Image: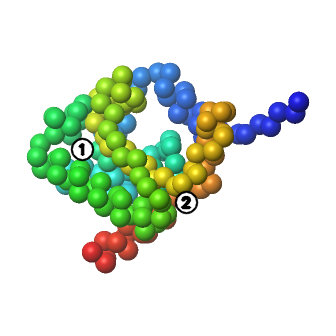
Amino acid sequence: MKRNILHAPWRFKYIVSTLKREKECIFCKMTLMKDEEAYILYRGKYSFIVLNKYPYNTGHLMIAPYRHVPSVEDLSEEELFEVMKLIQLSIKLLREAYNPHGFNIGVNIGRAAGAGVEEHVHVHIVPRWIGDINFLPSICNVKVFSQAIKESYGILRRKLQELMIVK
């Protein structure tokens, strides 16, 4: 039986990063980086929107507060309100850019809930399309992305600028 091999070398950096716990928080580190380097799409007063470097789907965004806290109950009312406003903006942005059929939006609080970065709360916004899960993720534990992250970032950044002008 011939075996087909699918290469996804960009995932190795993520796999290695899960083996060692980073000393500094990735979200806190991102805020000190240039937007293009960290894939930050928008910076608010209390929180920011960033493109996930290790997405579940094309256009997978995250919203994180600047303040380093582990859970939503630790956020101030102002922080929580802005996070919700950025969820709303992210949905509009993803609809304009990719026209998904739906969204998964969630917060994983604690390692048992699946939090990869459990010390800094963040919200995931994953665009979904009917039929976007095929046999590869289900059987082979492999996901194929048809767009490079830099290309996704460029598309989303331009579309966000258009939305901000129209607003």
Q: Can residue 32 be seen in this view?
A: no
Please say if 29 is above or below 60: above
> In the rendering, at what x and y percent does residue 26 appear?
37, 36
Q: Marks 1 and 2: in contact by CB < 8 Å?
A: no
Q: Is residue 84 left or right of residue 116?
A: left
Q: Which amino acid does label 2 sit on?
A: Glu
Question: Where is mark 1, residue-wise?
Answer: 66
Percent from the top left, x then y, of residue 137?
A: 61, 38
Residue 16: name its quadrant.
top right
Nearest to the observer: residue 152 or residue 13? 152
**29 relative position to 75: left or right:** right
Which quadrant of the figure has residue 64?
A: top left
- Is residue 27 positioned above or below 78 on the image? above
Does label 2 or label 1 sit earlier along the sequence? 1
Residue drawn 47% across the image and 59% down it: 101
Residue type beneath disc 1: Tyr
Compare residues 114 and 163 and report the one nearer the observer.
114
For mark 1, give the secondary structure.
loop
- Whether residue 76 sits left or right of residue 34 in the image: it is left
Q: Name the residue under label 2.
A: 151
Residue 9, percent across and down? 65, 38
Which residue is found at the position 47% from the left and 21% from the top?
A: 20
113 or 153, which is in the foreground? 113
Locate the N terminus by quadrant. top right
The residue lying at 16 percent from left, 40 percent from top is: 75
Q: In which quarter of the image is the C terminus?
A: bottom left
Q: Tell me residue 111's x, y (percent).
A: 36, 24
